[in-house]
Image (cartoon, grey):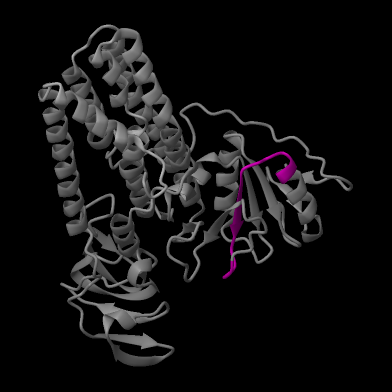
Amino acid sequence: MSQGHPPNVDLLDSLWMALHTVNGQVLAPALKTTLVGARADVRDRRRRQQLHVYPSVLMAHYEHLTVERQGHSFTIESQELQAGDLLWLQPGDVVPADGGIVAGLAEVEPAHFEASRQVRVCRPSDSLYAGSQILTGQVQLLVRRTGWQTRLGLITDLLHTEPVYDSALAHQQGEFARQAVLPTLALSGVLWLATGAYEPAIAPLQFDFGSGVQLSLRTVMLSAQVFAVQQGVYLPTAGTLEHLAQIDSLVIDGREGLPQRQQAQLLIQQLRQLGLHIYLLQDQGMSIEGTTDLTSDRLADLQAYLMANQRRVGWMSFGETCSCPEPTWLPIRWQPSTFAPNAKMVILLDGDWFALGRGIAIARDALERTYQNVALISLPNLAVTFGGMFFGLHPVVNVLTNNATAFMAEFWHGSSPQFRTALLPTASTTVPLPLLSLGSPQLAVAS
């Protein structure tokens, strides 16, 4: 505060503990310190276990690999692998990169992050991921991603950096917590003057102003980001996940071609059933049922329409560069050959339309769990705080309630590894997509 920083909730906690201690009530502050320390210790242990499963150095035991590159054979170090390299893997080899099998047959033990740990037989056209191990047979691998851009590398980076505090929800919680400090101090002063009793006056200082959000960001959001990578979708930050969960419109930029149109058709129908508006931008090519079609000369009209209606838009592109025209829209990249770490965009790692559906489902599930955790912590703490203010509830009850709900939010409801991946509810109905007037001529909705 002496350096110009506003008071924060730590000041309230410190005052609560100090005032109880000065008045001889040492049990509640001591219990609070012990339980908070125990939770931090459990959190650190879990984090170390995760980082042990996902090593920070990929395939460090590989010193040299023989690869075929542009028709020539080279002996290189594992860190020099590039997309497009071909290499043979023998029994006992650990797969050093993500890629697809082009020849051979082998039994493979999946990597730690894969959903199933059962040994499977892999054939040409199947995918292999860094961290898998060849048990029998041999296969030739076409490398697609190396280093930190493999699924194993992305998960490791997420666990190390924890990029979970850039969401609008986190900013709102932080601002609310800052704004609530001085009114809480004022409330305590008023209670002191009105009652002359210190226990009711101290009770408001213990109210939790948002650890439900903080714990959910660290557990739910991070777990969802890791799970999304396992499902073939890279969500670099919690803000990206939050934006994906809230999109109500999707613009598909098909001007450079549209892969797997049959898959696209099925996903578009699912998205329409959720009420999303789908726009297909292409200058030539066949329409897809359920999309609003437009050409490049109508893009400005579409931008103006979506911005005027305050739509939350996802922009899906297929080229080597991101073509998203608006900084407030969420870029969605289709299997780019390379991408920047922590870029505010969704990356479909394997060129799978249904991965986008899984990503939206995971994002919505994670956001829903976050709000549930906020309620799980805030409502009981609000109740015991008022109990301390008006009914003389012992402060130990407040401490036990605060830490019990925080533990439940962080370790029971927060760290579950499984999220919803099905996009649609059990019973679904088709939502009709109306014709949209963006000016003359009118856009056509394919049907």
Which residue is at 14% across, 44% downward? 41
Residue 397 in the image: above or below residue 95: above
Q: Residue furthest right?
A: 440
Q: Quadrant of the N terminus?
A: top left
Q: Nearer the viewer, residue 415 or 292?
A: 415
Residue 131 percent coordinates (x, y):
24, 65
The residue lying toward the viewer, choosing from 420 and 326, is 326
Q: Is residue 205 visible?
A: yes
* Residue drawn where x is 50% and y is 26% of the image: 427
Q: Position of residue 25 (x, y in %)?
A: 12, 21
Residue 88 on the magenta span: no
Q: Which residues are magenta?
A: 307-321
The answer to which image quadrant residue 56 occupies is bottom left
Q: Position of residue 174 (x, y in %)?
A: 42, 39
Left or right, 417 with respect to 238, comes to left
Which residue occupies 52% across, 45% down? Answer: 243
